[in-house]
């Protein structure tokens, strides 16, 4: 009997060991973390903040356009001389993000955002007070203004890369682009109204607006750089925390178990130009941007000549068509981009392979997922662009070119947003730097387009000018197919080099 009871006790002990072994193994099994601790509403809040800041770069550039004749008269300079201030603005707009973008990838997004908006606001004070006898000072302060405003777009793209997985970046990037694309729509309208009062009022308005934007960033924007805050749960230093921690208050109550990220080494953003797939994307994006900017830069002169019943204010209103086209196209394209990306994931990734972190497998064709719909957009964009030129050539009713402007704006951003989302996917951790590279390529190309567009229009007329510009887009379209074909090869080589 005693032996029997020992046997039962031994069996129960073994059974207990077996039943407890499974839960212990399950508990010890590491659970994959989500990519970011922020909820979807919190992500939208952050994207809204950076979109507001990103609006100031194109807004500052475009609010200046209607005042060019007034400035030429005030400074006793030719229109061409005042246009030089636009050209140097665009050059600095392309170069400065190379510095501030890499700083943001190394020292954090929040302090660089605040610094840029502070520089922009102070430069506007100088421009509002510049004496009309000092043309050189106008040129210099426009360079400083561009330095402060331009980098906000690159910084915002870096923030999206910090908080959003690839599958949701399209929607966030589409909404984020709403701010930078509303700038060209609202800028000329406000600038035209203010220019009739005083050209100095334009810069006082910008000073107040950017100053308020800087205060909003100081009060609400959290730090998102993953090398500093990880998935968002690591509490950074005091200067990297918002004064009113709407999001950070919740996160700071619980200690983070996120592994401390390694110290980030400085990476020269110019080295990204060694990647052929990225260079092809940047060149194609720059071509489309140049044609888009050639359209916007020539609106005032073309419409004033072809439709003489327009004045400065109504010409400014004509910019609303292409501006709202880009705004609506940005939101719609973002939704389509996320939908198509999810569709591709269902095809290439089984439910068992899906992860909480949102990271994609090496063999997932992210290039195809981003660029697959682009040829369809390109066909409509090129057709609308050529039609726009010939409508102006034949001096048709003003409603027709305005409708075509809307289509050009919507389709241009539908082409640029997927390429910008893709370059974020290709170099994780360097979102601001690679966007700065994108900025320098497209702004320098845009500066060339602005400097020669009047010469081409005078020589060829609007019809053949826009046939030529859109024909250049068609010539460079094969770059998209090369990226879809060769991109995965270069991407795997970069990943292998990073882990070696």
Image (cartoon, rainbow, N blue to C red):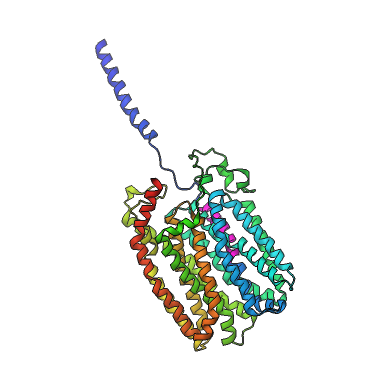
Task: Count numbered badges in the picture.
Answer: 0
Q: Is residue 201 left or right of residue 305?
A: right
Residue 300, position as x, y percentages in the image? 59, 80
Residue 386, quarter of picture: bottom left
Identified at 74% across, 67% down, the residue is 129
**From what the image shows, is residue 72 above or below residue 419?**
below
Looking at the picture, tell me which residue is in the foreground, 465 or 158: 465
Work out which quarter of the rendered image holds the N terminus and state it.
top left
In which quadrant of the rendered view does residue 167 lie?
A: bottom left
Task: Examine the rendered structure and indicate whether residue 478 appears above or below residue 396.
Answer: above
Q: Is residue 212 above or below residue 446?
A: above
- Which residue appears at 47% of the width and 85% of the height? 463
Q: Position of residue 186 (x, y in %)?
A: 60, 71
Counting from the top left corner in percent of width and height, residue 90 is at: 57, 68
Camera-side residue of 277 and 371: 277
Percent coordinates x, y for residue 210 in the rendering: 65, 61
Residue 216 appears left or right of 178: right
**Residue 47: in magenta span:** yes
The magenta segment? 40-57
Residue under the image location 66 percent in, 59 percent down: 119
Q: Is residue 393 magenta?
A: no
Q: Main secondary structure of the magenta part?
A: helix
Residue furthest out toward the bottom: 394
């Amino acid at each position: 009997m005693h032996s029997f009871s020992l046997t039962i006790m031994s069996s129960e002990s073994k059974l207990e060991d077996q039943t407890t072994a499974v839960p212990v193994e399950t508990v010890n099994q590491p659970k994959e973390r989500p990519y970011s601790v922020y909820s979807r509403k919190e992500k939208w809040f952050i994207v809204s903040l950076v979109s507001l800041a990103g609006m100031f770069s194109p807004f500052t550039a475009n609010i200046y356009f209607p005042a060019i004749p007034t400035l030429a008269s005030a400074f006793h300079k030719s229109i061409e001389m005042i246009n030089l201030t636009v050209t140097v603005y665009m050059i600095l707009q392309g170069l400065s993000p190379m510095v501030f973008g890499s700083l943001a990838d190394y020292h954090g997004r929040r302090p660089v955002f605040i610094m840029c908006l502070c520089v922009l606001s102070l430069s506007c004070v100088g421009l509002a007070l510049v004496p009309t006898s000092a043309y050189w000072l106008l040129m210099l302060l426009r360079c400083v203004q561009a330095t402060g405003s331009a980098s906000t777009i690159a910084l915002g793209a870096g923030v999206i890369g910090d908080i959003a997985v690839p599958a949701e970046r399209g929607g966030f990037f589409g909404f984020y682009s709403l701010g930078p694309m509303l700038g060209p729509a609202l800028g000329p309208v406000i600038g035209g109204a203010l220019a009739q009062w005083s050209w100095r009022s334009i810069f006082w308005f910008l000073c107040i607006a950017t100053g308020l934007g800087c205060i909003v960033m100081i009060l609400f924007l959290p730090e998102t750089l993953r090398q500093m805050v990880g998935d968002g749960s690591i509490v950074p230093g005091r200067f990297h925390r918002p004064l009113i921690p709407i999001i950070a208050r919740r996160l700071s109550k619980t200690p983070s178990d996120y592994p401390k990220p390694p110290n980030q080494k400085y990476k020269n953003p110019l080295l990204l130009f060694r990647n052929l797939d990225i260079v092809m994307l940047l060149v194609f994006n720059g071509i489309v941007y140049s044609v888009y900017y050639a359209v916007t830069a020539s609106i005032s002169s073309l419409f004033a000549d072809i439709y003489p019943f327009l004045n400065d204010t109504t010409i400014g209103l004509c910019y609303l068509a292409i501006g709202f086209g880009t705004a609506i196209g940005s939101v719609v394209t973002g939704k389509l981009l996320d939908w198509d990306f999810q569709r591709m994931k269902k095809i290439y990734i089984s439910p068992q392979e899906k992860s909480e972190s949102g990271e994609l497998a090496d063999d997932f064709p992210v290039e195809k997922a981003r660029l697959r719909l682009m040829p369809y957009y390109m066909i409509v964009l090129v057709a609308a662009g050529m039609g726009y030129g010939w409508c102006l050539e034949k001096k048709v009713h003003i409603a027709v070119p305005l409708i075509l402007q809307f289509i050009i704006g919507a389709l241009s951003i539908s082409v640029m947003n997927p390429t910008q989302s893709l370059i974020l996917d290709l170099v994780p951790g360097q979102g601001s730097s690679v966007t700065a590279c994108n900025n320098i390529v497209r702004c320098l190309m845009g500066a060339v387009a602005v400097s020669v567009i009047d010469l081409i229009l005078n020589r060829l007329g609007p019809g053949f000018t826009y046939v030529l510009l859109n024909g250049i887009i068609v010539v460079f379209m094969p770059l998209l197919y090369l990226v879809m074909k060769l991109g995965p090869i270069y991407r795997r080589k970069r990943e292998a080099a990073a882990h070696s």
